[in-house]
Image: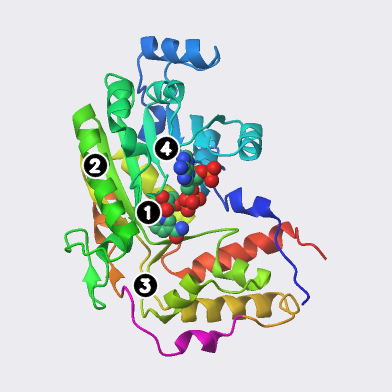
Amino acid sequence: MDVRHIPGRLSVTPLRFGHVPRNHRLPRFLTSPLCTVAAAANLRSKMGPSIPPTQNRMFFLGMGFVAQFFAQELKNLGWFVSGTCTSTLKKEGLEKNGYDIFLFDAHEPEQSTVEIMKHHTHLVVSIPPVVAVGDPMLQHEELLRSKLMGGNIRWLCYLSSTGVYGDCGGAWVDEDYPTKPASELAKLRLVAEKRWLKLGDDLGISAQVFRLGGIYGPGRSAVDTIIKQGALSEVQKMRGYRQYTSRIHVEDICQALKASINLPSLGKVYNIVDDDPSPRAEVFAYARDLVENRRPGWIKQTTVQPEFFVEKGSPRGEKRVSNARMKKELGVRLLHPSYRSGLQGIMNFMQHYETYES
Ligand SMILES: NC(=O)c1ccc[n+]([C@@H]2O[C@H](COP(=O)([O-])OP(=O)(O)OC[C@H]3O[C@@H](n4cnc5c(N)ncnc54)[C@H](OP(=O)(O)O)[C@@H]3O)[C@@H](O)[C@H]2O)c1
């Protein structure tokens, strides 16, 4: 099989974030002095002398896919960014990008890292729950509570999943729709959501939950899968049978995060999805056409057939997730309301950088 693949660095490079136009008016959350001089001095004493007292500081529990995109944007806009990961190699790579990174196992958290967290002004939690354990961070809830109490964090966002709704028989589902998580992981997610909101409440900070649809972006999309020609996992095959799958481009998650920082809301839950819940088969067929039309020859051998997805199967987890609250309350205007523009953007990005192996 002749496979041309995309270097891994695509997975952390934003599409169009990071550019601040000359006359761009900085959003309020970037200009307001959110922490005290004393707190900044405290952080400086722990983390180095170069942090201005009014600088916003983001801490990512888990520098994963979404976190790295958002981190890049915040850094370009002047934020101080810290976060955690679980491998030395990744830590070194992230540090080269200018972030303060801590090796961290949520099952056995370093007290010193939790201590440093409290000197940040904002916190995003992207570490997922673990089967038979639950949220690994919340196993240490008392440590978190005691260390973060009285600190500088004033905004927290827990990244959750639309999986908490379970199978809704194809209904449109807003944030008030009853949750019926089916899998153990989805049940643990729901518990984690409630506990992070409660912790935020106890700490007196603005905590919110983002229920994300299937996340895609450069390096992680149907286009990438087709170019890499990887065989589909059993889970991916099952998803293929669903009539509706909600998804969201990582750029739009970043937009929603920024909007939420600007408009903090205590204890709110938001669905973060695009306007176009569509069958996975449709998305893959579109991605395949896109690749073939734009770059004939990139796909030398077919292992992903669109027809494959329309075979019979159980309509697991069918629901159409509504993003009305995100638009109305956070004012988010989606850059990618449908997978079509999202995949086109990813394709443009690939073509622009022409970084393929021959
Ligand atoms: N993928 C989707 O389509 C989707 C859809 C809805 C919701 N979500 C959820 O949304 C959140 C953000 O998604 P994402 O795609 O950005 O996640 P991701 O790339 O999988 O990142 C997860 C992060 O959690 C860290 N982590 C995992 N287990 C850990 C542990 N035991 N101790 C410390 N750190 C740990 C990982 O560390 P390393 O950096 O060292 O790997 C990584 O930084 C995740 O919770 C994800 O499950 C994902």
Vertical comparison of 345 with 191: above or below: below
Specify the farthest residue to the front.
Answer: 132
Say what amino acid the circle numbered 2 marks.
Arg
- The answer to whether one can see residue 217 in this image is yes
**Mark number displayed over residue 1:** none
Q: Earlier in the sequence, mark 3 or mark 1?
A: 1
Location of residue 155 in the rendering, given as x and y in whole percent from the top left corner:
31, 34
Residue placed under numbered mark 1 in the picture: 131
Taking the magenta stretch, the answer to whether it contains residue 95 is no
Looking at the rendering, the stretch of residues picked out in magenta corresponds to: 304-317
Residue bearing the label numbered 3: 277
Disc 4 marks a residue whose amino acid type is: His
Real-space CA distance between mark 2 and mark 3, rounded to the nearest whole angstrom = 29 Å
Mark 4 lies on residue: 107
Q: Secondary structure at mark 3?
A: loop
The residue beneath circle 2 is 195
| Count of numbered circles on the image | 4
- Tell me if the residue at label 4 has its CB under 8 Å from ligand 1: yes
